[in-house]
Image (cartoon, rainbow, N blue to C red):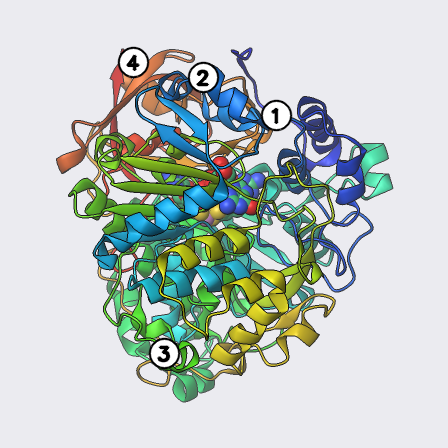
Amino acid sequence: MTEKVEIKPYGGAAGGWGSVKSLATIGRREQSGPEVLRELTRQNKPDGFQCVSCAWGKPEHPHPAEFCENGAKATAWELARFRVTPDFFKAHTVAELLGWRDHDLEQAGRLTHPMRYDQSSDRYVAVSWEEAFTDIGAKLKGYDPTKAIFYTSGRAALETSYMWQLLARMYGSHNLPDSSNMCHETTSVGLKACIGSPVGTIQLTDYEHCDAIFYFGQNPGTNSPRFLHDLRSCAKRGVQIIVFNPLRERGLERFTDPQNPVEMATNSSTQIATQYHQVKAGGDIAAILGMIKHMLALDDAAGGTVLDYEFIAQHTKGFDGVAAKARETNWDEIERESGLTQMALEGAGAIYARSKAVICVYGMGLTQHRHGITNIQMLVNLMLLRGNVGRPGAGFGPVRGHSNVQGQRTVGITEKPELMPLDQLARQFDFEPPRELGWDTVAACEAIVGGEAKAFLGLGGNFARAVPDTATMEPAWRELDLVVNIATKLNRTHLWPGRTTYLLPCLGRIELDRQASGAQTVTMEDSFSRIYGSRGRATPAAAALLSEPAIVAGIAKATLAPNPKADWDGWVGDYRLVRDEIEKTWPDLFARFNERLGTPGGFWKGNHAAHREWKTGSGLAEFNVPETLNGAGFEDGEDRFRLITLRSNDQFNTTVYGYDDRFRGIKGTRDVAMMNRQDMTALGVVDGETVSLVGAYGDNADKRVGGLRVVPYNIPRGCIAGYFPELNILIPIAHHALESHVLAAKSVPVRVEKT
Ligand SMILES: Nc1nc2c(c(=O)[nH]1)N[C@H]1C(S)=C(S)[C@@H](COP(=O)(O)OP(=O)(O)OC[C@H]3O[C@@H](n4cnc5c(=O)[nH]c(N)nc54)[C@H](O)[C@@H]3O)O[C@H]1N2
Ligand SMILES: Nc1nc2c(c(=O)[nH]1)N[C@H]1C(S)=C(S)[C@@H](COP(=O)(O)OP(=O)(O)OC[C@H]3O[C@@H](n4cnc5c(=O)[nH]c(N)nc54)[C@H](O)[C@@H]3O)O[C@H]1N2
Ligand SMILES: [Mo]
């Protein structure tokens, strides 16, 4: 099926009637029944289920309709009418399915039966659960456990994730990469080193107390639309919202609240950003340094009354180095590296200087760069200047991605042994867990490409499509001895079989999960470190589906020697028992877990930095001098661009709901290169022309994506934007953030070739 391509600027605000229309479209296409409408009323409610889309907080007192356009799409997508049955696979070979678009693969519907790939017919064929588990267990037993990969995508619940890490560790593997490795690992590493917190420090209610928000590289209109309500309330109270983003994202410009009858009836909207700075991709280090430089000048002029010297002296170290760096860096360099003018940065700095409580929000626009860690360090430098952490209305608000990605880390999905209480785990289950460093996503990709990895087991996600360098990955992937994917819908990773390949379908979170002790509740953690229960009620997509915990237990029992302390069957029968084990592993974080999971708004895991206790090497909050002002990690050349790969409004990561990126005015296609008009003129390309993007940096010179339609766009010169995952071919595996290893997907060096 091809779509009609239509490219024209969108005049509407985020939210509003556009979101209502978009909802109706997806409802029609998925042929969603009344069940979807019923479920939407339970979405993000204390006694309902937690949205499967993003990780935005669930308020203690929810709106009657506490869901957004994209959350509703996610619900309709999970509760789709269509089914991918064994007959579907009889009708389509894997080679044929590989020719389908990502959208069409998932649109085909929910998986219904466990399947095994059959090489001779190039088809998936149905197997029984028993057969699948027995064979997977037998194969796993034959490998060196350190060569098996246990990947987690950030959706699985705390209970499942805990069981998954236990399975991996009891088996002897510490290879627990997860989607966080491609996402906010830069926060986990960078923020932790600076202030001792690997996660955000604020609560949802802090938005009621701030008087300024500094907002970097996150797109709420698309990726966390419920946040727009909080932003709107802030804007109405006169909070200064200072945005840094190469693109003018509509949700940050203005918002029409679909739940506000006056705004809807009059088609009016609330302006969100008070200043909008179109920083160059990778230019944030310089932009923040410029603000700091201006703050120092203001402080000098005001006799030392602008900075919070008391806080700096009592709580921090390293201020002098950063101050010296800011003073000695000249404005020419700052302007060149940030793409912003001195006047603009002084304007932003002036707001910061007079704000009493500042929240700093950020997303992939900061974490996915070669110098992503430096980006985070610069945010910290800025915030420490006026003690903007650990008091009401002030602190760090990284916006997390998947609905439980933060929680998975909390319950032991990590390749880093120091982040896990291994001694406790050893005592609790009477075994010796591996103690060495395991593989993260980058190391896992390298091990697959290098032929070292033997087995890949994926708890959700679309690993092979989400990681960089897809073209190099594919042939190597096919050499894996065992590939097991636990999934709800068909995706491209499933179409790259290894020697033995299983596709194991599971219940979704919105569906009723009935086990021996009755209907089950699962739990997750949001961007604000709040943990709550989620109860599915919808009719399961197929009778043969197992829950994720049941599948993990099935693999565990077939793989591991019996251990009286690991009662896999008991746990599957009653998830409260898994929560008891979680509580035993982390008695402080999860005290009275089973009692507290029903707390409206969730219970807070706590955060030392929020109380100004700094769990860093020095025991203080740390300033860091940036070693470079160029976050991209490569020099600009005459024909070298910084490619930003991002999400459209009609996708959830690799799940493509449709072809309508409404706010950006791009409809009917995802194969685009959004370019600055002056760059187009310089290159001699015109609106609508088809070009290729080609790697322009060391070892990615051979990488190319063709057939991209040039869209003239309001984007800084030297930058191009396009969609993930189609453009992942262009990103070398080695092009990742230093230390955190998050793919540097927001500044990929490319050149434009006319085709
Ligand atoms: N509907 C929907 N919701 C989602 C997702 C989805 O795909 N669809 N994905 C989920 C996941 S896993 C995640 S991680 C989050 C992702 O949510 P975001 O963090 O919003 O991720 P992106 O869409 O990749 O875009 C990041 C933003 O950074 C900007 N940007 C790019 N480069 C730079 C830069 O150098 N500096 C600055 N300041 N800005 C820059 C881009 O223009 C864009 O607005 O959303 C989650 N929620
Ligand atoms: N170039 C580029 N690459 C990127 C990014 C980028 O911005 N640019 N972003 C990165 C980021 S932030 C992330 S988080 C990763 C995302 O990487 P992943 O988390 O691996 O990918 P998703 O697209 O979220 O996975 C979608 C699949 O999950 C399965 N699924 C859905 N619900 C369930 C469920 O309840 N249970 C199970 N078992 N399976 C389920 C479905 O089969 C669906 O096809 O991609 C990263 N890759
Ligand atoms: Mo993510």
For marks 4 and 3, give the one nearer the viewer.
Answer: 3
Is label 1 in a helix, a strand or a loop? loop
Let me know if residue 211 appears in the view: no
Classify the position of the C terminus by image quarter.
top left
Spatial CA span between label 2 and label 4? 44 Å
For marks 1 and 3, give the one nearer the viewer.
Answer: 3
Seen from the viewer's position, the closer of residues 197 and 277 is 197
> Along the polypeptide, which appears first: circle 2 or circle 4?
2
Q: What residue sits right under mark 1 in the picture?
A: 10
Give the x, y percent position of residue 272.
Answer: 64, 47
Residue neighbourhood size for the residue with mark 3, other residues' Cα within 10 Å, grouped as few (<14), some (14–19), many (≥20)? some
348, above or below 190, in the image: above
Q: What residue sits right under mark 3 in the picture?
A: 426
- Residue 684 disc label: 4
Is label 3 in a helix, a strand or a loop? helix
For marks 2 and 4, give the one nearer the viewer.
Answer: 2
Does the residue at mark 1 contact the one at mark 3 (Cβ under 8 Å)? no
> Along the polypeptide, which appears first: circle 4 or circle 1?
1
Let me know if residue 308 appears in the view: yes
**Residue behind label 4 places its C-beta within 8 angstroms of ligand 1:** no
